[in-house]
Amino acid sequence: MRRERIPWDQYFMAQSLLLSLRSTCKRLSVGATIVRDRRIIAGGYNGSVTGDVHCIDEGCYLVDGHCVRTIHAEMNAILQCAKFGVETDGAEIYVTHFPCLQCTKMILQAGIKTIHYLKDYRNDDYAMKLIKQAGATIDKVTLSQEYFDTLAFGEDND
């Protein structure tokens, strides 16, 4: 039985969901995938700086209600591009949760033109204003169960 191929937005968001499973944050697991020309150029999840302890092991390091140990998924993905010299100008980002204000500013400053997200999370009005002002677009993705029903333990397509 042949089924329709998964649409690009579903495919890239699924990658972000998979990345979120690597998160070391106890408060919220987030994944981000940066895409240019329908090719994945970077991925990230929220967690500690390389070499530091993880919140899942030591607990969160909270200052004014924010965990200062955690690097957000969007930042990790953008930093991966910077580290390896991969251009982000004109790219798209797929994030499991609506980006915080600081991540939104960083995304826009990196030249990323489209932000796709799966779940609303403290959506910031100023972030929305900045996205519009930058001429970028925001897209809330809805995953279709039909593409995920047969994964791993689903039907055989013999």
Image (spheres, rainbow, N blue to C red):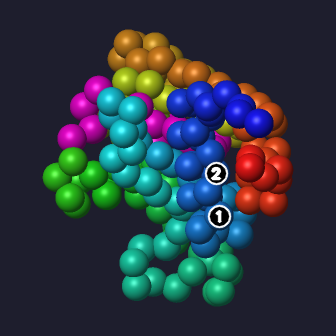
Left or right of 24? Residue 122 is: right
Residue 51 at x, y percent in the picture: 40, 85
Quadrant where the N terminus is found in the figure: top right
- The answer, for residue 97, to whether it is visible in the render is yes
Question: Mark 1 belongs to which amino acid?
Answer: Leu
The residue under label 2 is which amino acid type? Leu
- Magenta span: 87-103
Gap between marks 2 and 1, in whole Å? Answer: 7 Å
Within 10 angstroms of label 2, few (less than 14), some, or many (20 or more) residues? many
State the SS at label 2.
Answer: helix
Q: Is residue 132 above or below residue 59?
A: above
| Image location (x, y in percent) of residue 31 | 57, 53
Residue under pointer 2: 17
Q: Nearer the viewer, residue 127 or 89?
A: 89
Looking at the image, how many numbered discs can be counted on the residues? 2
Magenta highlight on residue 149: no
In the figure, residue 134 lies in which quadrant? top left
